[in-house]
Amino acid sequence: MDRGRPENPPDITIKAEDEVAKGRFSNLAQVGSAVDSFVLDFAFVQGRAGWLLARVLLSPQHAKRFHAALGDTLARYEERFGTIDSGPTLQ
């Protein structure tokens, strides 16, 4: 599948500070959009309190590519490990 990616993408080195590279656990994500961007908010909620961990802004084109990449990755995961139960949603 092409998905708009070049056949031979350039080599890119991504650097991350140690705290960023450790990652964070998020159990809540919200998505919003405007005409020129998508906003992905990732939070951790415990009880009735929550903390915004990261906000990621994407162009509409990048959001579409991200959606395709996440869908492909989820499909491969489920082929390997079985169907993911979505579980309860936070109320």
Image (spheres, helix red, strand yellow):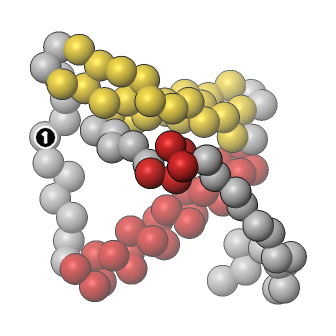
Query: Residue 22 vs residue 1: left or right?
Result: left
Q: Secondary structure at mark 1?
A: loop
Q: Quadrant of residue 8?
A: bottom right
Q: How many marks?
A: 1
Q: Residue at x 60, y 56 (%)?
A: 66
Instruction: Residue lying at the far front in this picture: please name it.
Output: 18
The x, y position of residue 54, in whole percent, is 51, 32
Q: As rendered, which of 9 and 4 lies closer to the eye?
A: 9
Give the position of the C terminus as an image quadrant. Answer: top left
> Label 1: which residue?
88
Q: Residues within 10 Å of mark 1 (few under 14, many from 20)?
A: few
| Three-letter code, disc 1 | Pro
Query: Residue 37 vs residue 72: left or right?
Result: right
The x, y position of residue 47, in whole percent, is 13, 20
Instruction: Residue lying at the far top in this picture: please name it.
Output: 48
The x, y position of residue 82, in whole percent, is 19, 77
Q: As rendered, which of 9 and 17 lies closer to the eye?
A: 17
Give the position of the N terminus as an image quadrant. Answer: bottom right
Q: Residue at x 39, y 80 (%)?
A: 76
Q: As rendered, which of 25 and 33 lies closer to the eye?
A: 25
Q: Residue at x 49, y 62 (%)?
A: 70
- Is 22 placed above or below 88 here? below
Query: Residue 32 vs residue 42: left or right?
Result: right
Q: Quadrant of residue 30?
A: top left
Q: Residue at x 20, y 52 (%)?
A: 86
- Is 70 placed above or below 33 here? below
Residue 64 appears in the rendering = no
Residue 68 appears in the rendering = yes
- Is 4 placed above or below 41 here? below
The x, y position of residue 78, in whole percent, is 28, 76
